[in-house]
Image (cartoon, grey):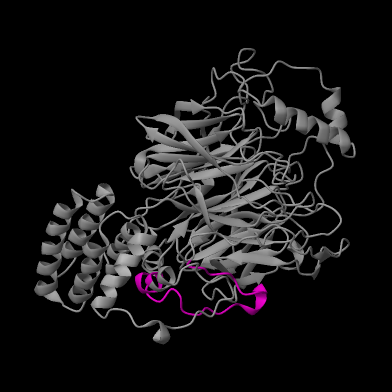
Amino acid sequence: MISNFRSLFRHLNRHHIVKRESSLPRSGTRGPAAPLLFVSLAACVLYANACASSSMSSSSGPSPVMSMSASPPSPDPRVGLRPGRRDSATARILERAGEASWNVRLISNTPPSEKFVGSTNSDLAFLGNYAFQGNYNGWQVWNIANLGRPALTTAYFCPASQSDVSVYKNLLFVSAEGLTGRKDCAGGGIEDSVSAIRVRGIRIFDITDVTKPKYITDVQTCRGSHTHTVLVDPNDKDNIYVYISGSAGVRDPRELSGCEDLRPDASPNSQLFRIEVIKVPLANPAQAKVVSAPRIFQDLTAPPTSTARSIQDSIERANRPRTAADSARAARPPTVRAGPTQCHDITVFPAIGLAGGACGGYGLLLDIRDPANPKRIGAVADSNFSFWHSATFSNDGSKILFTDEWGGGSAPRCRTTDKYEWGADALFTLSNNQMTFKSYYKMPAAQTSTENCVAHNGSLIPIPGREVMVQGWYQGGISVFDWTDIAHPKEIAFFDRGPLDPNRLVTAGSWSVYWYNGAIVSSEIQRGLDIFELLPSAFISKNELEAAKSVHFDYLNAQGQPKLVWPASFPVVRSYVDQLVRGNGMSAERLASVTVELDRLEKLSGAERKTGLSALSTQLHKDAVAAADSPRAHMMAAEVGRLAAAQP
């Protein structure tokens, strides 16, 4: 990479494309300078003023480190961050914890509204300028048109765990699994073990007027809805489908008829070893109902386990204060281990007809072309994984990532004593419906024993030609990493805070974090809503960020993964140029001349621009044959051709 930058800088300098050192803009960041001057200068040219100064939100503390160095900051500033202080009676933050960031900037942090303070914030969904944030006390809606000052639009008090949310057009779906959710949305829970007013399943709201939501109905299920997934079938315009993942115990049949807590070999009506599929008629969502219960776990045996991790878990359980749940667990008779009885989360990718199911001890591949009847077509297990939690596909469908929520999200699992492979992501290639393991990724900064930390929810950042993802790690903060080279995933940006409490573990941190229309939005369990800006760096150029921001979503449910499509543009083409420079994928001399030609063509218009782009595309395809990264060079050429075709 260094030699390519040096030769490119010499070439650009000969053509008077760059200024001399004395006239270059100075960086306004406080991070370390690039290790070699020519790397920093070339990067500033390549990445279109990425080295210019950046401002910092007053809410976010110290300035972020924005570095054109390809090396992460050392020592890692996340280690040893100052803890915050919290009023245990009111759950109010008394003192902010220390913060550390690299190549990302916190734009704003907005605390929860009054009735939601101290209650767990959960997942996010997006519609237009609104972010819907689930919470164990209901859900909140934030207008994020002004990223620096999100405005509370609605705070809907309607307790239930986890209150994970999804949206589609004028409908909002909210998960309910615990025993305390009520049909009337009142607080106080339900004392009776069997109750006609309990809600365990999916709540459906009309959000035509988001300031005045209307409770349409609920669909009850035998195990409730821990999470859910909205599937929009491209071949069915009249209905949408909701996959229910319930992980609680089976309800008493006196509360919901037909519920049976038996193994399938003992009863064909068992509610175990299956998911529920709800069909929602868009013309009359009040008629939503369960239409199937696919047994996607059928015949799966007990997954392999890590003896070392099991021993560590046993020791930690023995050393912690005993709870009622521990006593109940100890009182149960021993059982023979079996395969998974439920999924935790299912990510559907309708564009390729597949879904990834993170299901207890397995990662499943599902065929969803018949949306009401998903079928398991692949399964993988890993002894290093404790609890398969969620899944993400690459945009081309050639890779899939599964997360492991070892410890359930409330335990510290990123300490120096915790192995890299535990509580991490597992990365697989996907070919002919076969998943092949390639590597692990885990947020690399050691956390303390008072910080719950493990892999959790995230999404792709729409950078063309790459797999770059942002992911929440609870009190491990957010981590942006590149898994384009699936055998060697690499962290390229991060944000982290110190522990919420200096003396004990209080569950907090990023529950989920997603890229949405140019911003990174995170649901912070205790602190509210965080919004970030991803900065240009040695790993992501200004062109790549402009290309990512050109992808617009009308709505987003991360578990309903959309196919990313970029509008034809010069920043998209230049993204591939930058990637080829960064990876030595084509000669520096040729890439410099391509840069000059693109600049010239962008100043033209009409037929003259179209003809020039077509000729450049043809020549670049010829050049790509001998390029070191021939596939990426062809992608660049194809993108130039697509841009030519888009010209009037």
**Is residue 368 in sight in this rendering?**
no
Q: Is residue 180 above or below residue 304?
A: below
In which image quadrant can residue 573 be found? bottom left
Q: From what the image shows, is residue 449 above or below residue 60?
A: above
Quarter of the image where the C terminus is located: bottom left
Q: Is residue 593 left or right of residue 248?
A: left
x and y percent of residue 169 in the render?
46, 57
Residue 288 point in image, percent of width and height: 52, 42
Residue 59 located within the stretch drawn in magenta: yes
| Residue lying furthest top | 265
Q: Position of residue 567 (x, y in %)?
A: 29, 63
Residue stretch in magenta: 42-68
Q: Which residue is most to the bottom?
A: 23
In the image, residue 646 sits, relative to residue 242, either above or below, namely below
Residue ID at (55%, 27%): 381
Q: Nearer the viewer, residue 598 or 113?
A: 598
Left or right: 84 with respect to 468? right
Residue 115 shown left or right of residue 601 in the figure: right
Indicate whether 453 appears above or below 358: below
Residue 592 percent coordinates (x, y): 25, 68
Quarter containing the N terminus: bottom left
| Residue 453 makes an appearance in the image | yes
Residue 176: image quadrant is top right
